[in-house]
Image (tube, rainbow, N blue to C red):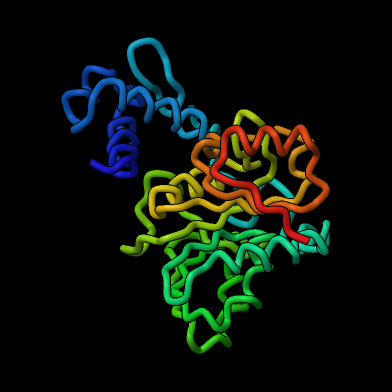
Amino acid sequence: MHATEREKLILQALSGNGFVSYRDLEASLDASPATIRRDLGRMEDEGLIRRVHGGAMALEDGADASPSPLSLQGTPFAKSIALNLAAKRAIGKAAAQLCAPGEGVIIDGGSTTYQMCEHLADRHLQVLSNSLHIINALLPQEGTTLLVPSGTIFREQNIILAPSGEHSMPNFHAAKLFIGAAAVSARGVFQADAVLVASQRRLLECADEVVLLVDSSKFTTSSGAIVCGLDRIDVVVTDPGLTDEARAMLEKHCGRVLVAV
């Protein structure tokens, strides 16, 4: 059983009296006790449930961690796109060169991943993206096939997201996933909003190789929720402002580091 299916069943079990025991989950889910505990830990990190002794509880009334459909935590796209723009353009161009002609890729919404778009026209890619900015940028490319997930449109980021546990992805598996981050540290890749975390975790399950696009300013903080550990990242594309300490950290945990100039 897929992780998103288990999350949906756990939330359904909680919708009754607001509590479900580990024993009940072990009886109803096709998963080991260790897997169930990992699921509950992940869902608690995403603000979907609260773990208690013997099981899990639904969030109290008024404590729903899902943000307003009009906004997400973090910097709005219109402001983010202007920050460190020269570095982001170089990173986007270098990341686009990692795409092999004709392959399927996922490009997660973000102001750095957006910079890939103008460099993809001649590659005849199949692109799945949750970003309306990215879709609009790729629409004029007649050789690029476009797919989008279902979900709610968050206007400030112009991104399509669905709650954790809700199946919203087309039946699509990609050779590469391109993602950004709010921050990066030795602990992993961070995002500011629980809905973004849940979305990126689902995308990680749909790709063979993960490419992280981050400018060097993202290594100065480590706040938010962890999307994944650095060992899940195959390639990091960043800029020459990367410190020696940050580079050593990445080279220790990730597949390779590309510095875009």
Left or right: residue 81 compared with residue 63 = right
Q: Is residue 11 visible?
A: yes
Front residue (pair 60, 11): 11
Q: Report the residue at 45% width, 48% height from top.
A: 204
Q: Report whether residue 64 is seen.
A: no
The answer to whether residue 239 is above or below residue 217 is below
In the image: residue 25, left or right of residue 217? left
Viewer-closest of 210 and 113: 210
Where does residue 233 sit, x and y in percent of width and height? 53, 44
Tell me which corner region of the image, top left, top right, bottom left or bottom right, holds residue 62: top right
User: What x and y, as percent, mark residue 92?
Assistant: 68, 64
Q: From this view, report whether residue 244 is shown above or below residue 199.
A: above
> Where residue 55 sits: x, y (%)?
34, 17
Which residue is situated farthest in the top direction here? Answer: 53
Residue depicted at x 39% and y 48%: 205
Vertical side of 217 occupied by 86: above or below: below
Residue 31 sits in which quadrant?
top left
Considering the image in quadrants, where does the C terminus appear? bottom right
Count every numbered label the image shows and give the total. Answer: 0
Quarter of the figure with residue 178: bottom right
Which residue is found at the position 39% from the left and 54% from the top? Answer: 206
Image quarter hosting the N terminus: top left
Tell me if 161 is positioned left or right of 23 in this view.
right
Going 61% across and 43% down the picture, which residue do you hit?
Answer: 193
In this view, the residue in front, 46 or 226, is 226
Q: Locate residue 160, reporting x and y percent.
A: 52, 61
